[in-house]
Every structure is written in structure tokens, then in C-alpha cells.
Image (spheres, rainbow, N blue to C red):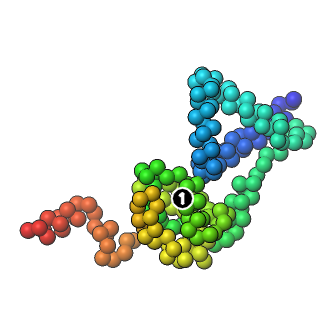
Amino acid sequence: MTAMQWEDEKEQIQTLFQSLVKKVQSGTDIEKVIQYRKIFRKSVPLLMRSYVAAYLCMEYLKNSSKVHRGSIKVPISSETQEKSLADQERCSLFISVGKNRRVYPQQLVTFIQKKTGLPRETFGHVRMLDNYSFIEVPRDLADSLIITLQGTLFKGKALVVNYARHKTEQPLEGSDEMFSSREKQTIHSREII
């Protein structure tokens, strides 16, 4: 293998790793991934894990990819899916459940799928934070999703679902978010007096 062929292959391997990282972060089959991870951790010594993982990737590429003139054909199903989602006009929804409830993105999407009957491809990127999440949906379905999911119980908590506000947007007038935490304390202490 020449140096040029190795550089091409190296780039494609890095692309494969990046796509795998995205799949894991998106929560695709997270329950199964967790089960595999437990077996992997029990079976492979700590100092050998990175070598075994590299060998597994090498075997995967050898068995599932076709080598043409020194290049690897990497499956791009998730990238193709992302492009088709980008074609639609999308918006983000705020959902009042996050990591603190031990929720994974795939669980949230599966829950929404069951409640609405929409296919997985309808939903875009899911961003999970500690106490809340954001999910991309087609703009034309956003209102019906908000109505359907608002107040629905998920893991023992009634969901609050709304359009996500961008950081640059101002809070609604009359809401507590108009005031800083210090101003809220001052207002509250004046109400008590």
C-alpha cells in the first residue's frame, strides 16, 4: 500500500468513526448498545479495549465494505438521511425532560413515535440537556406535535412542549424570565412584606 492510498483509507476510516460516534450520540438502538458495552467491558481487559475496538472496526471494514483501488466504500445511510431532513423546513421543539430523568434521545423519539404514529425519519437531531431537550421536527407538524404531547406523562412527569426559543429571542412579557434571579428575589421579598 502506498502512502497516498493509506492517506485516502485513513480519511475514510476517520469518516466511519465519526459516523459511528454520531449514531451512538443520537441514541440509535441505545438499549442494545448498552448491552454490548457491558459484555465488552466484562470480556476485554481495560488496557486491551482500544486495540480490540480497532480490530473490530478493521474486520467490519474488511467484511462489509468493498475495496476499490485502495479506497473503502463507507456506508452513508445516516448522512443521506440527514440530507433529506435538511430539505424540509424544520424547527426545534422544547421538551421538559432531560438527562436527569435518565432519558436517552432514542427513548424520547420512540415515545413521540408511539404517541403520534409518525415514522422515525420525521424527527431530526435531538439535543439532550440536564433538565430539558430539543428535537427538530418539520415546521408543518410542530403545532400538532405540541398539542398532542403537551401534558402527556413520560417517566412520571407531565411534559411541557413548546417551540424552542433561540438565545437571541426575548422572553415573553409577563413571564418570570424577564427578570434576573436577583430581581426575582427582590420582588418576592417585597411581596412578603
Q: Is residue 173 above or below residue 14?
A: below
* Amino acid type of the residue that numbered disc 1 sits on in the rendered structure: Leu
Residue extending furthest left? Answer: 193
Q: In this orientation, which residue lies closer to the viewer: 156 or 67?
A: 156
Quadrant for the N terminus, please.
Answer: top right
Quadrant for the C terminus, please.
Answer: bottom left
Q: Quadrant of residue 157?
A: bottom left
Q: Position of residue 40 (x, y in %)?
A: 62, 31
Side of 101 where 177 appears, left or right: left
For disc 1, the marked residue is: 108
Q: Is residue 109 above or below residue 9?
A: below
Side of 50 where 58 appears, left or right: right
Q: Quadrant of residue 35?
A: top right
Residue at image x 51%, y 74%? 148
Residue at image x 17%, y 66%? 188
Q: Position of residue 49 (x, y in %)?
A: 63, 27
Residue extending furthest right? Answer: 69
Q: Quadrant of residue 180?
A: bottom left
Residue at image x 83%, y 35%? 62
Q: In this orientation, which residue lies closer to the viewer: 68 or 81?
A: 81
Whether residue 146 is visible? yes
Secondary structure of residue under mark 1: helix
Side of 121 where 178 appears, left or right: left
Instruction: Mark 1: give few (<14), some (14-19) or many (20+) Cα within 10 Å.
Output: some
Q: Position of residue 88 (x, y in %)?
A: 67, 71
